[in-house]
Amino acid sequence: MAENTCALLRKSGAEIAKAICKAAGERRITPSEACYPVAHDVAVGLQLINEYLGSLPPYWIEPDVEELCHSLLQDLLDIITVRGTPSRPP
């Protein structure tokens, strides 16, 4: 199970980090905007997590790390779906 959760986090995190960097590169997010530092920190953090998880053999991943990966995946899913779900409660 750890391998699936971590692999999914690596894939999703890489895609989100790439999208943030692309938005910054195309100037859709500019350094003068308040969200820029947060977006930058999220992208860098996801890239670091991706590298770290990629360096570990699946059998080294402890249950608490898997739990953190699952929690982060849920948070990323919440961020992504908040815009596309009009019926989501406030």
Image (cartoon, rainbow, N blue to C red):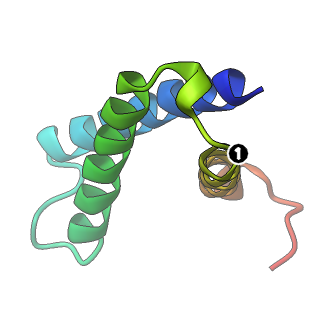
Q: Is residue 39 above or below residue 21?
A: below
Residue shown at 26%/61% (left/top)?
41
Residue 24 placement (x, y as % from top left)? 18, 47
Q: Is residue 84 above or below residue 22?
A: below
Question: Which residue extends farthest front?
Answer: 60
- Residue 19 in sight: no
Q: Is residue 18 above or below residue 38?
A: above
Residue shown at 78%/26% (left/top)?
1
| Residue kind at label 1, given as amino acid type | Pro
Say which residue label 1 marks: 63
Q: Quadrant of the C terminus?
A: bottom right
Residue shown at 31%/31% (left/top)?
51
Q: Secondary structure at mark 1?
A: helix
Residue nearer the viewer, 36 or 70: 70
- Residue 11 in sight: yes
- Indicate left or right for 44 with 78 as reference: left
Residue 84 placement (x, y as % from top left)? 71, 48
Residue 62 lies in what quarter of the image?
Answer: top right
- Indicate left or right for 78 with 26 as reference: right
Number of marks in the rendered image: 1
Residue 39 placement (x, y as % from top left)? 31, 59
How crowded is the residue under tag 1: few (<14 C-alpha within 10 Å), some, or many (20+)?
few
Residue 59 placement (x, y as % from top left)? 60, 23
